[in-house]
Image (tube, rainbow, N blue to C red):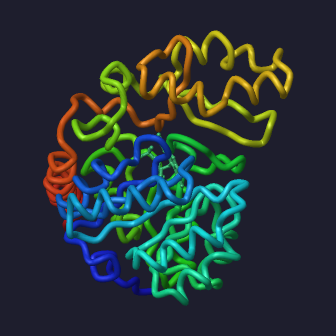
Amino acid sequence: MEQRKLSDILQIKYPIILGGMALVGTAELAAAVSEAGAFGQIGAGGLEIPEIKEEIARIRSLTSKPFGVNIPIGRRTDMESFIKLMKAEKVKAVSLGGGNPLPYIAPLKESGITVMAVVASSYHAVKVAEAGADIIIAEGFEAGGHNSPLELTTLTLLSSIVPRLSQPVVAAGGIVDGKGLAAALCLGAAGVQVGTRFMATKECCAHPRFKEALVKAKETDTVVFGRGLGHLLRVLNSGFVKKYLGAGEKELSQEQIIALRSGNRNKIAVFDGDLQEGFAYAGQNLAPIDRIITAAEVVESFMQEAKEAIKQAAGVVKE
Ligand SMILES: Cc1cc2nc3c(=O)[nH]c(=O)nc-3n(C[C@H](O)[C@H](O)[C@H](O)COP(=O)(O)O)c2cc1C
């Protein structure tokens, strides 16, 4: 089935979306991504409604390009106020992650907002598509942050979701360069959503020590914890994780694990750069992240590398 182009729907030049990221998805980072011709998103996770309003005002002072707002639904009880705000602010697009998006798709669409829904199986992809989501984000198990207990990879998701939908499918999880973009496009994706690669940028507010840790890390340096709780988190395998959560997770009570994976412990690593006392989300595909550059350089290198990768691949399969 032919998909509508991401660039037409989101009014962007390049098919790259900044994944919603709680704590680090600030107006500055989102504006830098939008300014570069991709689609920036404010990460509204953990923010109260007035704070989200402030972030929207801040991004509007930094760019006139389109941007979106990501909300991890989780146990939020203020979704009605959130939708009201999105409508009042005439936000271009909202992405719904971390929970059941079905009740919120129609109200957002009725307000003229493009709806992007994050899914981790073809079953849920079809459900959100039927409910009217405009863009389906297929997020694989490689992704940083919350993972689905289904543990399906990005490659598997694209292969199973793309043929079943007429809506554009965006690949998320493990895409950190133009080769990944090219691979996703070859698998039928309309574009990519990128989180981790945009954390190792100059505009990201994370502590330099955490950004350096991302640059130094390789593909074996993330772990998933929380399987016992059914709430999986992919994080950098820091001193804190090794000490409390890695191999020792089985010996801890559920209450202890919940306390250890609190937002505060996350902030200690992300903002103070203390990886001995806090944890930080990161995607699995860390090996190619080799330097801290600007968000615009990330976007440019994605496009350049994707062109080269597609040319090279075409050379391999030519008659
Ligand atoms: C630090 C961090 C925070 C994240 N927070 C959220 C969030 O609040 N809401 C959400 O829907 N996804 C969240 N994600 C997932 C991203 O939006 C994106 O889908 C993911 O990072 C893509 O995989 P990658 O990390 O391999 O690029 C987060 C990811 C990271 C790395």
Task: Residue at 40% x, 70% y: name it.
Answer: 188
Q: Out of 25 and 133, give the one closest to the viewer.
A: 25
The C terminus appears in which quarter of the rendering?
A: bottom left
Using the image, determine if residue 3 lies above or below residue 289.
below
Q: Is residue 245 left or right of residue 51?
A: right
Task: Residue at 40% x, 79% y: name it.
Answer: 90
Give the x, y percent position of residue 222.
52, 27
Total residue callouts:
0
Q: Quadrant of residue 37?
A: bottom left
Give the x, y percent position of residue 242.
61, 13
Using the image, determine if residue 189 lies above or below residue 195.
below
Q: Out of 68 and 123, give the one closest to the viewer.
A: 68
Q: Is residue 3 left or right of residue 146?
A: left
Give the x, y percent position of residue 33.
25, 55
Give the x, y percent position of residue 43.
46, 53
Task: Residue at 23% x, 66% y: name it.
Answer: 14
| Residue at the farthest front position | 50
